[in-house]
Amino acid sequence: MNLVIKQIIKKIKEYDNIVIARHIGPDPDALASEIALRDSIRLTFPRKKVYAVGNAVSKFKYFGELDRIDDRNLDKPLLIVLDVPNKSRIDGINYDVYDYIIRIDHHPNIEEIANLEMVNENSSSTCELIVELINNTKLKMNKSIASNLFLGIVADSDRFLLGYTTPKTFSLVTKLIENYKLDINKLYYNLYERPINEVKFQSYIALNMIITENNFGYIKLDKKIMDEFKVDSSAASNMVNNFNFIKELYCWAFSSYDEKNDIYKINIRSRGPIINKVATNYNGGGHMYASGARIKDESDVDKLFYELDMATKEYKESLNKD
Ligand code: AMP
């Protein structure tokens, strides 16, 4: 057994109070991984108190319920942080109350946030890492845990389309489907069923996106247009991956105004230029080819788009050199 996995299971055995957390604004990989790991630890060690925390998202209710606790009341708790590389983006915990911290993640490192890390940037998803953890330890799995892990892998790999989808990903997923008799078509409904207004909104984006001569595509989605299509600032996140494999786009970014938080939510994707380094300058981050940012001042949205255009130009020029 890999040394880190051995150390993780040792710590899980050692602690009676365990809190599992993930990033703010969770996506299916973040939610599925925290709920699956919580349920697996509960199933294996029924006497332990294990909580999955953070704000709930109603459209992702099918992954299971989250726990509402005050971690300041827990005795010597262990924290397991999933799918997030920076302290400021962990949702729903008081970082300083924990006795020991483990991080399991596939994001590039940003800062040291844990005593023990199982981090693999080349993994398709955090859920894939949780499957490896469970498969290589005495942690148990059942059908609902397997279903969540399957959906997290499918979502973060965009149905096995994105890089970091490896033979290992397929092999782990095959075993999940076979061993737990997953009805994958039924599960896909949860992830992919969407209202027609979102599809119309996607068409609006395709029709109105500006594409630069460097093959960078961008669009600003303001409150008026989101109201017209009856969508909110989370809608762009649901469809940003659908703009992959468009011949004229090497990189694309959407800005959606989030009225509640008075902030611009940026979704960025790429199939060449490295985008997370650019996003880091604008209160953002993420992966090399899938990244995001949160921006207060609209003029910074323009600056970010300009820098992304320049990164795309550089990438395009590097292609022409070959
Ligand atoms: P999204 O476009 O929201 O699906 O995010 C793509 C990736 O970027 C995910 O890995 C997010 O965790 C990451 N990300 C999004 N927004 C931010 C942010 N403000 N700071 C750091 N990482 C972010």
Image (cartoon, rainbow, N blue to C red):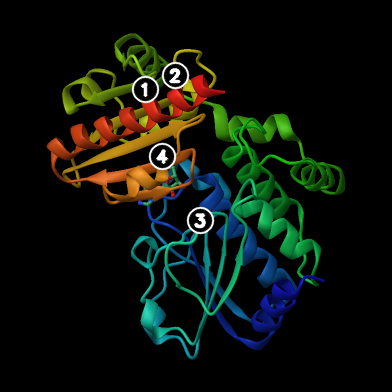
Q: Which mark is residue 251?
A: none
Q: Residues within 10 Å of mark 3 (few under 14, many from 20)?
A: some
Residue 318's spot in the image, x, y percent?
48, 27
Question: Is residue 106 shown left or right of residue 266?
Answer: right
Q: Amino acid at mark 3?
A: Pro
Question: Is residue 37 shown left or right of residue 241?
Answer: right
**Badges 4 and 2: C-beta atoms under 8 Å apart?**
no
Residue 107's spot in the image, x, y percent?
52, 54
Q: Amino acid at mark 4?
A: Ile
- Of callouts 2 and 3, the N-terminal one: 3
- Of callouts 4 and 3, the N-terminal one: 3
- Residue at 57% of width from left, 49% of height from top? 63
Residue 122's spot in the image, x, y percent?
64, 50
Q: Amino acid at mark 2?
A: Leu
Q: Residue at label 3? A: 108
Q: Residue at label 1? A: 216
- Residue at 34% of width from left, 9% of height from top? 207
Q: Which mark is residue 249?
A: 2
Q: Residue at label 4? A: 275
| SS at mark 4 in the image | loop
Q: Is residue 68 above or below residue 232?
A: below
Q: Is residue 208 above or below residue 136?
A: above
**Badges 2 and 3: C-beta atoms under 8 Å apart?**
no
Q: Quadrant of the N terminus?
A: bottom right
Q: Residues within 10 Å of mark 2 (few under 14, many from 20)?
A: many
